[in-house]
Image: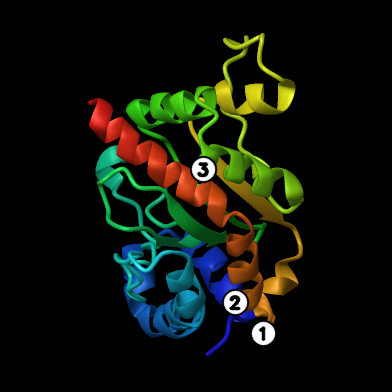
Amino acid sequence: MPFSEGTLDFMALNRVMNSREWFHAHHDEYERLVVSPIAELVEAIAPGMEKIDPQLIIVPKVGKSISRIWRDTRRGPELPIYRDVMWITLLRGKYLGYPSFWFEFSPRILRWGCGWYQTEPETVAAARELIADNDPDWRAALASFEKQSVFFLEDSRYKRTRHPEAPENIRAWLDEKSLCLIHEERNIELLYSDELPSRLVRDFKRIAPVYYFFLKAVSRGKANA
């Protein structure tokens, strides 16, 4: 079934109730309103994403390509048990340092992008080396990024530039502590649209050269280690 207002209503109410008992009593609604439409979205974008990278692991199940709605409270027992945010993550393998394509939604905003939540330092260092070498994959990545207006480079930059001699557009990349392209969509109605899967695949194809550059940085970083 497709996403609906009931999807976001359930996520918001579950977050407010913040009760394992309430969640388990309404587990059928969770499966029907939340998990089922996310799984359909994963299946819908899979063919297009496999064309970008056949090695992407795409499994439309919670704990695989689909996030859990509950937190690991061992990392923050003072935090709520349940989130009102869900996401899908497509990457070559967990815990291997690879970049991902991701889509996230909540009652407040839709977001999607490519990269890392926190890039490993050796990968960032390798990316800077590729930029300094004017590597062809870097040139292709920069060209594709500057040709589009959907994604922006997440600002995790140092407060004071470490590369004052570099052109401004390249300095922004060199000064990043972590690497991720993000789009933020305030039109929540897009979540309910049949156009969502094709929109995601189309946008991800725009920045595929950036993804390939990220992969190359991972490979160089591992070789340098």
Check disc 3 and report the residue beneath it.
Answer: 137
Q: Which mark is residue 197?
A: 2
Under mark 2, the amino acid is: Pro
Q: Quadrant of residue 214?
A: top left
Pointers 1 and 3 in contact (CB under 8 A)? no
- Residue situated in front as seen by the camera: 142 or 116: 142
Pointers 3 and 2 in contact (CB under 8 A)? no
Under mark 3, the amino acid is: Asp
Location of residue 62 in the rendering, given as x and y in whole percent from the top left corner: 33, 70
Residue at 35% across, 39% down: 218
Q: Nearer the viewer, mark 3 or mark 2?
A: 3
Location of residue 127 in the rendering, given as x and y in whole percent from the top left corner: 45, 31
- Give the crowd class for mark 1: few <14, some 14-19, many >=20 residues within 10 Å: few
Q: Residue 210, relative to residue 56: is it above or below?
A: above
Residue at 58% across, 44% down: 141
**Mark 3 secondary-structure assignment:** helix
Determine the CA span between mark 3 and mark 2.
27 Å
- Residue situated in front as seen by the camera: 96 or 142: 142
Residue at 73% across, 22% down: 168
Determine the CA span between mark 1 and mark 3.
34 Å
Pointers 1 and 2 in contact (CB under 8 A)? yes
- Residue situated in front as seen by the camera: 161 or 132: 132
- Give the crowd class for mark 2: few <14, some 14-19, many >=20 residues within 10 Å: some
Location of residue 55 in the rendering, given as x and y in whole percent from the top left corner: 33, 64
Q: Which mark is residue 194?
A: 1
Q: Residue 197, relative to residue 53: is it above or below?
A: below
Left/right placement of residue 132 relative to residue 224 reads right
Residue at 41% across, 35% down: 119
